[in-house]
Image (cartoon, rainbow, N blue to C red):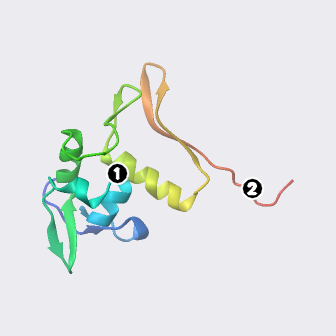
Amino acid sequence: MGFLGKPHGIFSLNNSDYSIGSYISIDDICEILDVNQSDLTNIKFEKISDKLYADEIVVHKAWHNGVIRNAPNVNVNTFKTSLDELILIKIIKKIYPEANIEHQVQWGKKSIDLKVTVNLDFGQK
């Protein structure tokens, strides 16, 4: 993702190796949060190259404050989650569609953000 503070650059789920900025397109926000564009009416968007983008901090705060309709719960297994975790889950699923991703897994008295299990069968038996 981008820099803390002032938003800089564009992020893209489909090109996350090279597009690592802090402005997220409306389409990517919908995919990350599993919502429709109509659920994002409380988000301030900026038009960049004929597409709508929002600052990741604005999206994160709106989601944590409950103003994005139909968005997933901020609390997972009694631990708060971050927008970055949801973004990582979507990126991992793009690379490993069959991955089993456990979110906010209990680890002692704390939790780990993500536990990812993939089958890396390289044809070996």
Which mark's residue is nearer the viewer, 1 or 2?
1
Residue 33 x/y as whole percent: 34, 51
Closest to the observer: 115 or 71?
71
Q: Residue at x 24, y 58 (%)?
A: 38
Q: Amino acid at mark 2?
A: Asp
State left or right for residue 96 relative to residue 67: right
Residue 124 x/y as whole percent: 83, 57
Q: Secondary structure at mark 2?
A: loop
Quadrant containing the N terminus is bottom left
Asked if 20 appears above or below 103 in the picture, the reply is below
Residue 102 x/y as whole percent: 52, 38
State left or right for residue 83 relative to residue 117: left
Q: Residue at x 76, y 60 (%)?
A: 122
* Outermost top residue: 109
Residue bearing the label numbered 2 = 121
The local crowd at label 1, few if under 14, some if 14 to 19, many if 20 or more residues have their Cα within 10 Å, is: some
State left or right for residue 97 relative to residue 17: right
The local crowd at label 2, few if under 14, some if 14 to 19, many if 20 or more residues have their Cα within 10 Å, is: few
Residue bearing the label numbered 1 = 33
Asked if 121 appears above or below 74 in the picture, the reply is below
Label number found at residue 112 = none
Asked if 86 appears above or below 91 in the picture, the reply is above
Residue 39 x/y as whole percent: 24, 53
Q: Amino acid at mark 1?
A: Leu
Q: Residue at x 15, y 73 (%)?
A: 47
Closest to the observer: 4 or 65?
65
Q: Residue at x 81, y 60 (%)?
A: 123
